[in-house]
Image: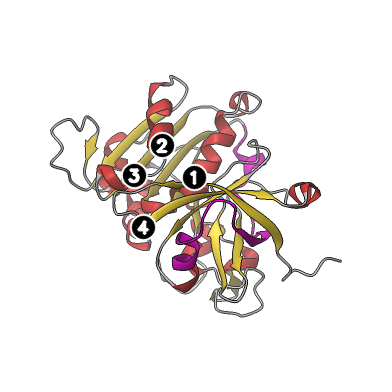
Amino acid sequence: MQNPYLPYPVRIDDITVESEDRNLKTFKFVFLNPDDEAKFAYRAGQFAELSIAGVGEIPIGIASSPVEKGFIKFTVNKAGVVTSRLHNMQVGDIMGVRGPLGNWYPWDLLEGKNVLIVGGGFAFTTLRSSIIYMLDPANRKKFNDISVVYGARSPGMLLYKNELIEWEKRDDINMHITVDGTKDPDWKYNVGFVPPITEQKAPPGDENSYAIVCGPPIMIKFTQPVLEKLGYDHDHIILSLENRMKCGIGMCGRCGIGRELVCKDGPVFTLAQVNRTPREY
């Protein structure tokens, strides 16, 4: 049995600055030992611990998709000691990745269904992984209609801009990009917060439709009643509570909400499951 606290050594292969404030960067890693990539088999929705020797580790959702081979990606917000050190590292530097951890979006259940994705801010990482997975030629026929509502504070804070543009051109995914506000006269997408844009643009829910929601708690809070109004049942609303993750395996207890441990039992829950925990969303 492998030690669950032991990270795989990885090398930084590429760094992309995602946001205009330069606080969001996407790191592309390759495993030093090629056999470790197979051991790190993951599914869209899971997370991992990024570790820097002598500094610490931080749980981050996996931004790459299982259908992307030869590397893994994480988009990291500079917000603490570990993430600040990571933002100062360079291509070629060595660090650790521990995982994959947590559960994933219920892909077997979602096959043959309409899927609505609602995301906000830099929490869009695991949703990128999910979209890439569903749009893969080997998987696209497994899903019916795919719709996406994704928002950020401003155009310069949107993640994965080139991919958003490419997805918007496709006829097999309905993209609805929005920003809270902008003075850009050339902005051609939506302006408004994610919940009202979801109410305006998202398809109605039914027994064959599921919604996946990942974003800031305030966005999740105000998106829930919108989805209910659109007709999505609570067991068809799938949430990722990524802000509660810590050690990754439920040992430290910091991720507890009632009897559930977000790191171990989540981070993916249905709203029906969340409703059975102490009310925080």
Q: Position of residue 160 (x, y in %)?
A: 42, 40
Indicate which disc, 2 or 3, sits on the residue closer to the N terminus: 2
Q: CA distance from mark 4 to mark 3?
A: 12 Å
Mark 4 or 1: the one toward you: 4
The N terminus lies in which quarter of the figure?
bottom right
Q: Amino acid at mark 4?
A: Asn
Q: Which residue is mark 1?
A: 127
The mark nearer the N terminus, 4 or 3, is 4
Q: Nearer the viewer, residue 147 or 275?
A: 147
- Mark 2 vs mark 4: which is more N-terminal? 4
Q: Nearer the viewer, residue 17 or 119?
A: 17
* Position in image of residue 204 (x %, y %): 38, 35
Part of the protein shown in magenta: 83-111
Q: Which residue is mark 2?
A: 148
> Mark 4 or mark 3: which is in front?
4
Q: Nearer the viewer, mark 2 or mark 1?
A: 1
If you read the primary sequence from the N terminus, does the residue marked by circle 2 or circle 1 appear first?
A: 1
Q: Which residue is mark 4?
A: 23
| CA gap, disc 2 and disc 3 | 14 Å
- Numbered disc 3: secondary structure: loop
